[in-house]
Image (tube, coloured by chain):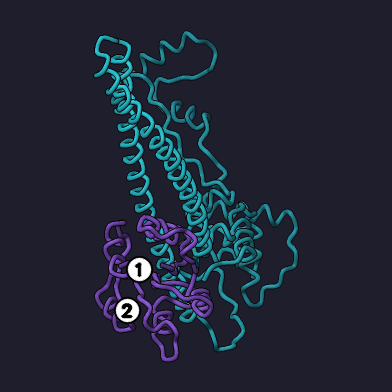
Amino acid sequence: MKILIVDDSSTMRRIIGNVVGQLGVSKEDFDEAEDGVVAWKLLQENKYDVILTDWNMPNMNGLELVKHIRGEGSAHRGTPTVMITTEGGKSEVITALKAGVNNYIVKPFNAQTLKEKLDPFFR
Amino acid sequence: MSMTQEEIEALMNDTAIEDKVEPADDNIDDILAGIDGIVDDEPSSDEEINIDDMLAGIDGIVESEEESTSDDMDDILAGIDGIVDDGSSEDQVDDMDDILAGIDGVTDSEPKKEIKKESPPADTLEDKIDQGIFPLPSSNEHKIVNQLNQVAEDSEEKASQIFDVLSFILDENEKVESALNKNSKFIESQVELLTKLATKFPNIQLLQDNLNEANELKNTCSNTRNVVAEENNKIFEAMEIMQYHDINRQKIERVMSVIKKLTTYLNGIFEDDSKKPEVQIAKHISGDSHNTVENEDLDDLIAEFGK
């Protein structure tokens, strides 16, 4: 199980990585990216089982990244993608779901919530 | 629009000049310079003295340098019947009390403490900033967006360091748990062995004692493992709470964005694209609260110069 964590906050990346670690994923099995551009570059070079991305990031935000991932010709169109963001508005959730995210988590979240949302992808 | 340091210093210099008590004849020079037809022929020192006398005679012009002194108080007291101050002896203090007792409204009480007048505002830059006369200089330390950005970056760095500490504790706890498990397995095997021996040799008290001690150790290991697990849960809770660092950072970034947009808007609304040179502005206009001359004063001043 290989996971890509995309967030401009290093603290958030570590928090998510910690929870993912509790689900049995070792540190070697997840990569981190601080924005959409770095994430997209990693996606060109690696294959991931799950992508966890923030929305608001510099250079390329999470929504644009999801659109790239779900875009035509992308090798990751089928990769489960979860948006983890502070954007808690209904319209934002709808926008993200329309863009192609598989699940949506609003910060702050607890470890249990993240585990429950990720559990289907770990089976 | 924020002011540059140079603009603030220029503003300070102007104000400092205005704050100074200028000689009256300098003001006259300024006023007369503004009146057509009056030529400054450098009046002699005698004329300056006359001007001072004249100004002293004009109502409303008060020399601020004069302050009430103890001499004034002596004059007032001298005006009261029966008070004679020859300044000769202290015995007269008693007489003074008698006299004062006879004056209506004067009561026998402790002398009132003199009410200290508020000291005039100081002229330092810090004082003027404190009084709201000047804004803080627009240095990097006072630029709001810069400061907010720095707060966001610093707190990100510190949050990462806090996370390092929490991760270190988690890693150490993992080692403790591993050691506890190893010890527990050994103790459990000892309990099993001692239980068998104590059953087989019930008369040997030492075996029973060791079995009891091994059971205690087993319980201690179990309790310690629970403590470590609880500690880990608390660390995970702390890590979850650290999400608020990211949330707060985003709130700060939202404020920064509002300020940036507001700056752009204000720059746009105050922008002067007429390309006209800056007009010369009047320093003192009729109706201003200070430094304007009344018509009568103006006539007197003109008359003083024989014009």
- Residue B186 position in % (x across, y down): 38, 31
The residue identified by callout 1 is: A85
Q: Chain of mark 1?
A: A
In the figure, is residue B306 to the left or right of B168? right
- Residue B101 position in % (x across, y down): 32, 17
Q: Which chain is cyan?
A: B
Q: Amino acid at mark 2?
A: Ala
- Tell which of B261 and A12 is nearer to you: A12
Quarter of the C terminus of chain B within the rendering: bottom right
Please, is residue B178 above or below residue B287 in the view? above
The residue identified by callout 2 is: A96
Neighbourhood count class around disc 1 (C-alpha, 10 Å): few under 14, some 14–19, many 20 upward? many
* Observer able to see residue B26: yes
Neighbourhood count class around disc 2 (C-alpha, 10 Å): few under 14, some 14–19, many 20 upward? many
Residue furthest to the front: B200
| Residue B214, disc | none
Q: CA distance from mark 2 to mark 1?
A: 11 Å
Q: Which chain is purple?
A: A
- Tell which of A57 and A71 is nearer to you: A71
Residue furthest to the bottom: A72
Q: Chain of mark 2?
A: A
Residue shown at 46%/11% (left/top)?
B92
- Tell which of B98 and B112 is nearer to you: B112
Residue shown at 33%/44% (left/top)?
B234
Q: Amino acid at mark 1?
A: Thr
Please tell me whether mark 1 sits on a helix, a strand or a loop: strand
Q: Do callouts 2 and 1 mark residues in contact (Cβ within 8 Å)?
A: yes
Residue shown at 27%/17% (left/top)?
B198
Which quadrant holds residue B99?
A: top left
Please tell me whether mark 2 sits on a helix, a strand or a loop: helix
Which quadrant holds residue A87?
A: bottom left
- Residue A103 position in % (x across, y down): 29, 73
